[in-house]
Image (cartoon, helix red, strand yellow):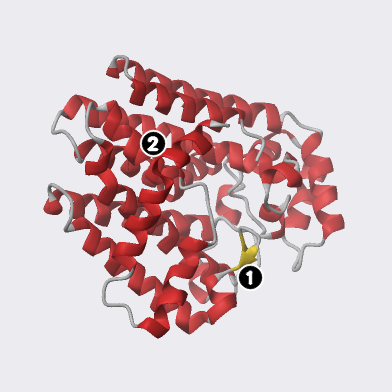
Amino acid sequence: MDILERLHSLYGREIDEELKKYLGIDVHPEFRDAVLYQVSTGGKRLRPLIALTSARACGGDYRRALPAAAIVELIHNYSLIYDDIIDEATLRRGKPTVRARYGDNAALLIGIWYREAIEEAILSTRNPPLFAREVARVIREIDEGERLDILMEYAGRRDPYFVENRLGPKLLNNWEELYNTYLRMIRLKTAALMRTSAALGALSVTDDEGCVKALSEYGENLGMAFQVLDDVLDIFGDVRKFGKEIGKDIKEHKLGNIVVVMALRELSEAEKSELLGVLGKVPVGDDDVRRAVELISRTRARENALRVAMEFAGRAEDALGRLGVNEGVEDLREILRFTVTREF
């Protein structure tokens, strides 16, 4: 049993009950199944597990952080509902997306319901104004991260804003700018919510600024390592273990994958042109993906990306080192180890 399975066996039922409680407020009986569908499709519940374990790491009772756990999981699923609308996605976690199951208009309404469920959960926290500010901050960050992610796509979008402001032509002339924009994008889109998960868990039980700061740094750096490794697995993972389509980022024309970023630094001009040609195709086929992976494999992109992930993991470990020793801290350390060694 890995650390997430163990923590889920401890907290999973309470997390799910908390989610249903806030999503169920005033919901019409005919709408209830549609509202609950997104959270019922599965997921590792990583963010609420981080919140509850962070409360323990600060010496508190994890039950006081259950509203925080619900908040971060609702934010995560809220963002996924809208991601799938934006990307016109039909499958997530091997099941139809909300938009595929109920239609885009219903998905928009369900997304609004999630946003208001977050507000209801905030009212149950020990400091609603403080929690509300952090929630507003992180939702804005996720939104900006999504905007950058789309702008870093090399082709495929029809929306006038994204066509007119596409970043690829600008970033390809300056590798350092491309790399730094990538890091900023994943810090906003992925790492910010990991930071908030740890911070809200801590704030649920303490006002100790040192504990909150250390856990915020842990969560952000864990999130950075998590996303970098997710990018590596997207290109080089085993679909049976990863549980997602391999090469999805290539099919989605993404420059915002660290493996692609690292490869572009090393490839010859002819090879770079060929890789960009694949990223620019609409649509990108399976043979195109195989050719892109073949080109990338000629470089040290995988090794360099893994090195970056380990650097962020080291920073997360350093942050935990400031908290002393207790079972909560050790469980967070195990989550970090699991993240950097996972194969799926």
Q: Residue at x 20, y 39 (%)?
A: 203
As shown in the figure, which amino acid type bears the numbered disc 2? Glu
Q: Residue at x 80, y 35 (%)?
A: 297
Q: Is residue 306 visible?
A: yes
- Image coords of residue 94 (percent x, y): 66, 60
Q: Amino acid at mark 1?
A: Thr
Checking the image for residue 220, the label placed there is 2
Q: Is 168 left, or right, of 251 in this rendering?
A: left
Is residue 104 rendered to the left or right of residue 60? right
- Determine whether the residue tagged by mark 1 lies in a helix, strand or loop: loop
Check the picture and name the quadrant holding the N terminus: top right
Could you classify mark 2 by the number of other residues whose Cα lies within 10 Å: few (under 14), some (14-19), or many (20 or more)? many
Q: Are marks 1 and 2 in contact (CB under 8 Å)?
A: no
Quarter of the image that includes the C terminus = top right
Question: What is the x, y in percent for residue 29?
Answer: 37, 82
Q: Position of residue 235 (x, y in %)?
A: 72, 44
Residue 90's tag is: 1
